[in-house]
Amino acid sequence: MLKIDGLVLTVTDPDTGRETEILHGNSITLAAGEAIGLVGESGSGKSMTLKCILGIEPSGARVEGAIELDGTDMLAASGEELRRIRANDLALIAQNPHGTLNPVLPVGRYLVEGMSDARNMSRADARERAADLLRQVGIADTERVLNSYPHQLSGGMLQRVVIAGAISGDPKLLLADEPTTALDVTTQAEVVAILDEMRREHGLSMIFVTHDLDLAAAVCDRLAVMKDGEILEIGTPEDIRDRPKTEYTRALMAARPMLYPDGHPATAPSAAPGAGSDEEADA
Ligand SMILES: Nc1ncnc2c1ncn2[C@@H]1O[C@H](COP(=O)(O)OP(=O)(O)OP(=O)(O)O)[C@@H](O)[C@H]1O
Ligand SMILES: [Mg+2]
């Protein structure tokens, strides 16, 4: 469904005019319903890759190569077409839900307006669907949450609202950029489990950006290891664990000695005491 071929991103310093290549010819293909993790340290080019897919790279940047979403050449698409694709087919879940949600509106308005605009729904129907989506992401007291302002809710709660909003548009591809990094470990596990469950239930593809190999392995079919703007290798979590192709991947693995010792990420001992069991995270 998504085909990225030889993606090169070059930015130009507006003051000096000097060009810097940020992404060095990366290729990724993603099948419908598949989840791939982009894993790498800070500055490796994970977010920039997502920005290129969304067509929101920094102004003055040059994107070369090919990005094809369900047959549409994203790099040749008009602004109008890109806006339509962003609204209908893509959903971004960013690290900080406060950046996504409007601070002066109750979160219900965010969900309801999003849906009534995008899907031509009546307000009443949209509100009902918003409540339904909130229940799907594990929120029981939907009325209270719908009527709350972002500052009245916890980060984990807000990220659930953002996930509900992302799903509400029936996108094809979820782009999640460190969606749980800002949350504490327990909440992180819960929110990732919810994201995973929603993605599977709705049959969505996903690119999951993180610096956490364990987390990516838990929710992705394949992992792409990135360093300095380059994809070093792509493989299943098992490939990456058992047959790392590069020294860098080996080092990344060595930095995570607890990486699924029993062959499954859900069995890895929790890094934080009292972080709760994986069973709870799945509930
Ligand atoms: N607006 C910008 N203009 C020019 N260069 C940028 C810009 N934003 C980021 N960069 C550079 O692009 C490279 C990749 O950055 P990117 O944000 O994609 O990294 P990342 O892997 O997402 O890191 P992190 O884990 O910290 O979010 C970095 O070297 C960064 O300095
Ligand atoms: Mg980033």
Image: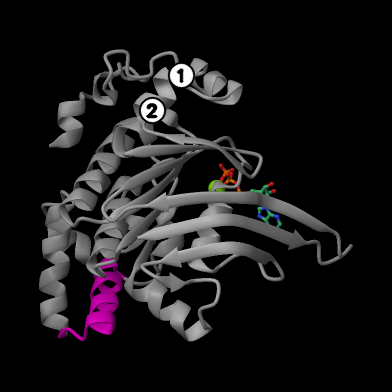
- Image mark for residue 214: 2
Q: Are marks 2 and 1 in contact (CB under 8 Å)?
A: yes
Look at the image and tell me whether residue 153 can be seen.
no
In the picture of the structure, the residue carrying the numbered disc 1 is 256
Residue 156 rendering spot, x and y as whole percentages:
31, 46
Q: Nearer the viewer, residue 106 or 14?
A: 14
Residue 250 rendering spot, x and y as whole percentages:
53, 19
The three-letter code of the residue at mark 1 reads Arg
Q: Nearer the viewer, residue 145 or 54?
A: 54
The three-letter code of the residue at mark 2 reads Asp
Which segment did they paint magenta?
A: 106-122
- In 3D space, how far apart are the residues under numbered discs 2 and 1 (Cα atoms)? 8 Å
N-terminal of the pair, mark 2 or mark 1, is 2
Magenta segment includes 117:
yes
Question: Which residue is at a point 44% across and 20% down the rendered structure image?
Answer: 243
Q: Secondary structure at mark 2?
A: helix
Residue 267 rendering spot, x and y as whole percentages:
24, 19
